[in-house]
Amino acid sequence: MQKIDKRGIVMKYKRIFGIVLDSVGTGAAPDADKFDDVGSDTLGHVGEFFDGKLNIPNLQKLGISNLRDQPIKGVAPAEKPLAYYGKMEEVSAGKDSMDGHWEMMGLPVTHALSLFPNGFPDEIIDKLKEFSGRDIIVNKPYSGTEVIHDYGEEQMKNGELIVYTSGDSVLQIAAHEDVIPLDELYKICEYARSLVNEPPYVIGRIIARPYVGPDKDHFTRTANRRDFTLEPTGETDLDRLQNAGFEVIGIGKINDIFSGHGITKGYHNESNHDGMNHVLHVMNEDFTGFAFTNLVDFDAMYGHRRNPKGFGEALEDFDKQLGEVMANLKDDDLIMMTADHGNDPGFRGTDHTREMVPLLAYSPSFAQTGQSLGVRSPFSDFGATVLDNFGVQNVSGKSFLSELK
Ligand SMILES: O=P(O)(O)O[C@H]1O[C@H](CO)[C@@H](O)[C@H]1O
Ligand SMILES: [Mn+2]
Ligand SMILES: [Mn+2]
């Protein structure tokens, strides 16, 4: 089933579809104690919340419970899993999306990014005040929906910037769209980005968080959110693929996470559903390379909001569309699914959780039942497998391509 492209490169698969189910972790990682996340288990706790009724038949057939020590409640391990299955363990210093995705693409984040559990120091805040000509309020870790509920009306009166953070390396600025126009907000964020690219402060993301609404009970955040991510600190597997002449399609947050590096074509997602529609759309196109998708609703809408019901329903919706995707896969397509970190809606707090992530790899051309791929670490094994398929040299991780048959 091997293909040979124009340049004589031998490929097992012509197209690889990588899908990151953002924050869908599968149990505390061995180093979870360092993050105070012992006992977290996103998939396990969502399953328990549904008390045996979580309806994810496609993930079930692929082997989502086979990869776990304890099956998800009500989701039996498949007798003959369709996919090769395993878990991945992160080595990066943090548990943010950036760390997870960069590590998956061969660039583990070994230096911890700056965190601000007590708020940002004066030297950053003073510069932001001076640049924007606005006062700054809050300046501490907060949930983004709660912060606009608690401080949005004050901002509408006085026009300050609501600056807040979380357990991640993020500086977020919430602003009512009628009070601080989007252009102005983005300029302030760009300026903030320029302040924190080098030690002593290296922040993963500056996030513009615009919202609208008449009063605190009706404020909603808009799709005009924008992430200003640290530029990748080196080459990633996406660059390597692109440089070797393959197509690299980024769907959803992928473009932001890699600041556009190594991506030949990008699609913005309005939602998980929209993201899966983009996957279905690109499946109809004839390309040779890698389509990399991030589905962020699990994380942003349900994990951080500690909403296990919404989380499970989002998994059920995803599973339906996954069925469609599977039906459209060609023999020389490979689909690989994983996650970038956990965000257990049954756990304390509102932050990501340091978890193992699931790994499922499936092609309709597999001749045998899926086998265990074991525990893979670093996450870079994912990207190494993609590179291996396209005959491109990797620098981090170990390919499992030869195990897929
Ligand atoms: O509470 P909200 O504003 O959704 O913020 C969440 O979103 C950030 C970026 O994904 C995370 O770091 C977390 O703090
Ligand atoms: Mn994430
Ligand atoms: Mn998140």
Image (cartoon, rainbow, N blue to C red):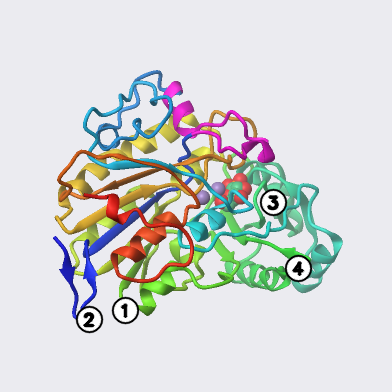
Which stretch is magenta? 27-48
Secondary element type, mark 2 = loop
Q: Earlier in the sequence, mark 3 or mark 2?
A: 2
Residue at image mark 2: 7
Asked whether mark 3 lies closer than 8 Å to ligand 1, one says yes
Q: Disc 1 and disc 2: Cα gap in Å?
A: 10 Å
Q: Disc 4 and disc 2: Cα gap in Å?
A: 43 Å
Q: Residue at x 62, y 41 (%)?
A: 351
Q: Are marks 1 and 2 in contact (CB under 8 Å)?
A: yes
Three-letter code, disc 3: Thr
Residue at image mark 1: 245
Secondary element type, mark 1 = loop
Q: Earlier in the sequence, mark 4 or mark 1?
A: 4
Relative image position of residue 239 (x, y in whole percent): 43, 73
Residue at image mark 3: 165
- When asked about the image quadrant of residue 386, the answer is bottom left
